[in-house]
């Protein structure tokens, strides 16, 4: 049953990614007819608020899938991670199919607009999404054999530091983006730090019952 849920959550995410990519195709035809590149161009106020609303709706839809698929808090979050990760990966897959973009995994993109623009190379969200999907599947598999997901304090600390590192890497160019300037070089060091810390946190939690998984008595 759980494997079927994972499959259908992934199918939804792939289809939803196509819808999102199609919207971006239309936006780029309006604002970047010769091809997307930085610095950003001024978007009409109306389109800007529509985009913010679309991004918020996207998060709500992906979270709703997790809530509907999972049977407890961590399962719901795990399914959300799977949905978000698959959606983000196939968002770029579909853009490649439709626009033959990105030309390289190192091409820059606007990753998010809430609450301020996040920018970075395509490879960054791609790698994070792979980690999200992998972690989500592991949480669900563990939960299915009655080994609840219970992160240690150290795992929480590492995950928080990892999140801050990744966020800083995406938001360090916010001012340049808002001023319609070219960004400074992306901090791959912060991305690598975040990915390593996330991986260590998950390893510490998954390594055995004495490190975070306890069978219910």
Image: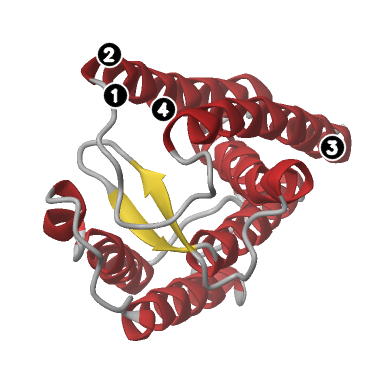
Residue at position x 44%, y 19% in the image: 57
- Say left or right for 172 vs 1: left
Residue 38 picture quarter? bottom left
**Closer to the eye: label 4 or 3:** 4
Upstream in sequence: badge 4 or badge 3: 3
**Disc 3 element:** helix
Q: Nearer the viewer, mark 3 or mark 1?
A: 1
At x 51%, y 75%, the residue is 199
| Residue appearing at x 78%, y 46% in the figure | 97
Disc 3 packing (10 Å; few <14; some 14–19; many ≥20): few
Residue 146 in view, yes or no: no
Residue in the foreground of this view, choosing between 77 and 53: 53
C-alpha span from label 2 to label 1: 5 Å
Q: Nearer the viewer, mark 1 or mark 4?
A: 1
* Residue at mark 2: 46
SS class, disc 4:
helix
Give the answer, above or below, for where 116 lies relative to 151: above
């Amino acid at each position: 049953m759980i494997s079927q849920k994972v499959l259908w959550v992934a199918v939804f995410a792939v289809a939803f990614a196509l819808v999102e990519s199609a919207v971006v195709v239309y936006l780029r035809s309006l604002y970047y007819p010769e091809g997307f590149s930085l610095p950003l161009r001024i978007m009409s106020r109306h389109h800007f608020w529509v985009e913010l609303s679309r991004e918020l709706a996207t998060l709500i839809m992906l979270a709703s899938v997790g809530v509907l698929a999972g049977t407890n808090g961590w399962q719901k979050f795990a399914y959300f991670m799977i949905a978000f990760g698959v959606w983000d990966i196939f968002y770029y897959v579909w853009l490649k199919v439709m626009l033959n973009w990105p030309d390289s995994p190192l091409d820059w993109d606007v990753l998010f607009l809430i609450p301020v623009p996040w920018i970075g190379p395509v490879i960054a969200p791609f790698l994070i999404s792979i980690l999200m999907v992998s972690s989500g599947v592991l949480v669900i598999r563990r939960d299915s054999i009655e080994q609840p997901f219970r992160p240690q304090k150290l795992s929480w600390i590492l995950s928080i530091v990892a999140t801050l590192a990744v966020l800083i890497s995406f938001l360090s160019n916010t001012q340049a983006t808002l001023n319609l300037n070219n960004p400074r070089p992306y901090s791959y060091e912060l991305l690598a730090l975040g990915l390593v810390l996330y991986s260590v946190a998950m390893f510490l939690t998954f390594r055995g019952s004495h490190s975070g998984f306890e069978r219910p008595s």
